[in-house]
Amino acid sequence: MAWSFARKKKDMPDGLWMRCDECGKTVYRKDVEAALRVCPECGFHFSLSSAERIDMLLDPDSFTELFTELAPQDPLQFVDREAYTDRLKRYGEATGLKDAMVVGTGRLDGWAVALGVLDTRFMMGSLGSVMGEKIYRLAELAVNRSIPMILVCGSGGARMQEGVVALMQMAKTSAAIALCQEAGVATISLLTNPTTGGTTASFATETDVIVAEPGALIGFTGPRVIEETIKEKLPDGFQRSEFMLEHGLIDTIVARAELRKELARLIEYLQAEGGPPRQVPETEGPASAETGGVIGTSDQAEADDAEAAPSSETNNPPDADAGGSPEPTEP
């Protein structure tokens, strides 16, 4: 008599696993989500929606969206594979957005900021008339309130369906950056994968500080088109964040897990004169508020107080070699 020990295969729920676009390995989706959508095997940074990016960067419940009434028009009555109006409707239904950018105000580690986030899910984050108008209005608001403006960029360039109207937004967004700089208001851009075309050629690379995520494609024309044009093989890593940092286009590369902390540090350094003070998040104690949070710390404040107070045992200053107060940080 033949015996069968075969076990019945359990049904696996859909969506437990996903394949990394960079290394090709199959990874557990929950591990990717826990790492802020970063591959645990190779460190590849998956794209984020505008809502996910806002939740990741800003303090909870601090974001207020602005200029929601703006929606793209079709002045050219453009038709390619489908009418532009039909394309806008299709992307709107798929994403819940009116256009490729969400802007508003919020707080990042307690600091008031004006934030704009491009969303590659909507026509690849392409630059059009609505995006140009939102960025300029956001810049005006940042100047009026003396708060820094942060622009999170991910884009395929200017929107061809709007023709010259889209190209004009390059000048308009450049003027928005200049408006902030002339007023002494800090501007920071965060370049994500990909940031290309007219977006790269305008506001994305004109800010006071240019930050990029690791491995992001940054350039005007893609490497495939360049290779076909010049008939030469491009160097490895061409147009990636690391290449751009080495060649001076960007200022720093920051992994996604460290972005919030690094942006908070930059904001504190670049605060405009007369700007609003930092509001300490509820997770911090009152001592952090008195010392500024990012640079000063509550531990340092206690150390400074201990150094300033006379000792009950001796009037001699503490011996640093014997475990006395650490050297004070810069204010």
Image: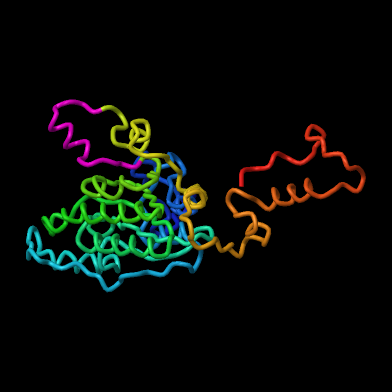
Where's residue 302, x and y in %?
74, 51
Relative vertical location of residue 226 with respect to residue 284 in this rendering, above or below: above
Q: Which residues are magenta?
A: 216-234
Which corner quadrant of the image does residue 54 belong to? bottom left
User: Which residue corresponds to the image point at 48% horizontal and 48% vertical from the top-left?
Assistant: 266
Where's residue 161, x and y in %?
12, 58
Which corner quadrant of the image does residue 196 belong to? top left
Where's residue 204, x and y in %?
30, 48
Relative vertical location of residue 137 with respect to residue 28 in this rendering, above or below: below
Residue 48 vs residue 40, the one in the foreground: 48
Residue 52 vs residue 1, the one in the foreground: 52
Is residue 166 found left or right of 205 in the rendered image? Answer: left
Residue 257 seen in this snapshot: no
Is residue 199 found left or right of 270 in the rendered image? Answer: left
User: Which residue corresponds to the image point at 68% horizontal and 42% vertical from the top-left?
Assistant: 328
User: Which residue corresponds to the image point at 30% horizontal and 71% vertical from the top-left?
Assistant: 68
Is residue 68 found left or right of 111 in the rendered image? Answer: left
Where's residue 245, x and y in %?
37, 35
User: Which residue corresponds to the image point at 25% horizontal and 64% vertical from the top-left?
Assistant: 99
* Residue 222 located within the stretch drawn in magenta: yes
Residue that protrudes farthest toward the right in the picture: 313
* Residue 214 located within the stretch drawn in magenta: no
Q: How many marks?
A: 0
